[in-house]
Image (spheres, rainbow, N blue to C red):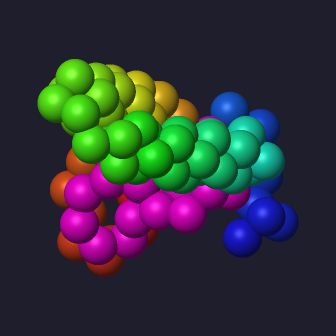
């Protein structure tokens, strides 16, 4: 869906059914998603270190990175996050 206009500054399309964001519609959304996946992969490697401190750090980093991703995605979704039941906005 890269053909859609992003003049409104949206990085993500809204989901048609449910709550949240759909797929990215701008390169910034794809970059954010790639950065999130890479961060989670790095955190998984930290978690494999095995020590208790490393696992606690991995959990804290995972919660922080996921929280940031959700906040940015919510702010950059066309029309914001709200419940949608298949009707057009």
Query: How far from the left and from the top, in percent, is residue 77?
Result: 49, 43
Q: Which range of residues does the magenta coloring cover?
A: 10-25
Is 2 left or right of 32, judged from the image as shown? right
Residue 25 in which image quadrant: bottom right
Q: Is residue 24 magenta?
A: yes
Location of the N terminus by quadrant is bottom right
14 or 56, nearer to the observer: 56
From what the image shows, is residue 72 above or below residue 1? above
Location of the C terminus by quadrant is bottom left
74 or 36, nearer to the observer: 36
42 or 16, nearer to the observer: 42
Q: Is residue 23 magenta?
A: yes
Residue 56 in which image quadrant: top left
From what the image shows, is residue 53 above or below residue 78? above
Is 38 left or right of 63, judged from the image as shown? right
> Given the current orientation, which residue lies at the most extreme right position?
3
Determine if residue 3 is in view: yes
From what the image shows, is residue 30 above or below residue 35? below
Is 82 left or right of 31, judged from the image as shown? left
Query: How far from the left and from the top, in percent, is residue 23?
Result: 55, 63
Query: How far from the left and from the top, in percent, is residue 31?
Result: 71, 44
8 or 41, nearer to the observer: 41
Question: Residue at left 29%, top 29%?
Answer: 54
Residue 16 in which image quadrant: bottom left
Question: Residue at left 50%, top 51%?
Answer: 41
Determine if residue 29 is in view: no
């Amino acid at each position: 869906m890269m053909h859609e206009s992003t003049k409104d500054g949206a990085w993500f399309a809204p989901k048609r059914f449910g709550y949240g964001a759909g797929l990215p519609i701008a390169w910034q959304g794809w970059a954010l998603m790639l950065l999130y996946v890479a961060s989670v992969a790095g955190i998984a490697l930290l978690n494999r270190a095995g020590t208790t401190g490393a696992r606690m750090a991995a959990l804290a980093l995972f919660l922080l990175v996921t929280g940031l991703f959700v906040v940015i995605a919510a702010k950059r979704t066309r029309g914001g996050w709200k419940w949608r039941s298949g009707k057009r906005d």
